[in-house]
Amino acid sequence: MNIPNIFQATEVAQLIERINMLSPSTKPLWGKMYSDQMLAHVNVAYEMAFEDLHPKPKGFKKLILKLFVKKAVIGPKAYSKNSRTAPVFIIKGSRDFEVERKRLINYLNKVLSLGKEHFEQLESHGFGPLSSEEWNTLFAKHLEHHLQQFGV
């Protein structure tokens, strides 16, 4: 899988161009989400990095995340179609498409402006400290998966 580098302006611009190809009526090639839900779903990863909206896992749950989930999330292997989603990422009901699209673009621009150095060994919500390359994979692999899901 070719994972975009969200610390490079040209690659962020390409991602934003693809995001802007989406519309509220864009249908997925697989899965059950609508485009507004997908954008809100992708935004959860950024919320965990930048906002205090989701409780941090503790104890046994954090151990399970580090031992079993981390490799799948930040490893090089692409996510499979219709793979299981953590409960916090499940978006129920409809969302405002334009609000969610703008939030995602703003998050991408925030990552770009903070730069690679900001993310080096930054504590993640559930995986502990990550390298900037792992942060890039965490954000970009997930986004790439869902942009492909919606054919953009």
Image: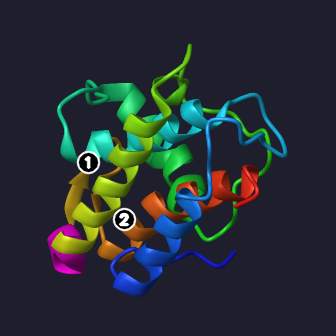
- Residue 125 appears in the rendering: no
Q: Find residue 130 and report its horizontal and vertical position in percent.
A: 31, 64
Taking the spot 47% from the left edge, 34% from the top edge, the residue there is 40
Dot 1 or dot 2, earlier in sequence: 1
- Residue 41 appears in the rendering: yes
**Magenta span:** 114-119
Taking the spot 26% from the left edge, 24% from the top edge, the residue there is 55
Q: Classify mark 2: helix, strand or loop.
A: helix
Task: Specify whether 76 is left or right of 13.
Answer: right
Q: Amino acid at mark 2?
A: Trp
The quarter of the image holding the N terminus is: bottom right
Residue 57's place in the image compared with 142, above or below, is: above
Magenta: main secondary structure: helix
Question: Local crowd at mark 1 within 10 Å, few (<14), some, or many (≥20)?
Answer: many
* Tag shown at residue 71: none
Q: Find residue 45 and report its horizontal and vertical position in percent.
A: 39, 45
* Tag shown at residue 135: 2
